[in-house]
Amino acid sequence: MAGNTQDSSPQSFWEGYKEFWGERFSFMSNYSNFIKRDKPLTSWSDSDVEEFIASDPLHGPVIKFLLEALLLPWTDGTDTTLM
């Protein structure tokens, strides 16, 4: 992994390991703007989610179905009008 094979200390091994995998996952630096934000995204309220479901004909029904599927175990299983 590392270019220097004579130094076998744990520190040199770790540096070689990081270099090896750093080269293979260098594409992850493209996502740092989304992952490491200075200011986190605001959370969505229930009304925001309902507005999105109503406004997006493609993804809205999918989100509604997923929310119902997530909430079903917390109900008795008979209530299908969760949203």
Image (cartoon, helix red, strand yellow):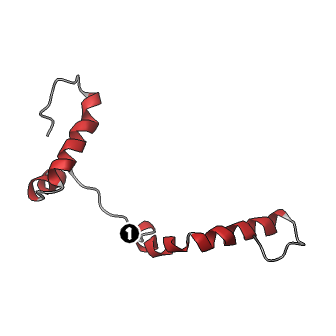
Q: Position of residue 31 (x, y in %)?
A: 44, 71
In the picture of the structure, the residue carrying the numbered disc 1 is: 39
Residue 47 visible within the image: no
- Quarter of the figure that contains the C terminus: top left
Q: Position of residue 23 (x, y in %)?
A: 61, 74
For residue 7, above or below residue 63: below
Quarter of the figure with residue 7:
bottom right
Quarter of the figure with residue 12:
bottom right
Q: Residue at x 14, y 50 (%)?
A: 50
Q: Viewed as shown, does residue 31 lie left or right of 48?
A: right
For residue 45, above or below residue 71: below
Q: Nearer the viewer, residue 67 or 41?
A: 67
Three-letter amino acid code of the residue under disc 1: Lys
Residue 8 visible within the image: yes
| Secondary structure state at the residue bearing disc 1 | loop
For residue 53, above or below residue 66: below
- Quarter of the figure that contains the N terminus: bottom right
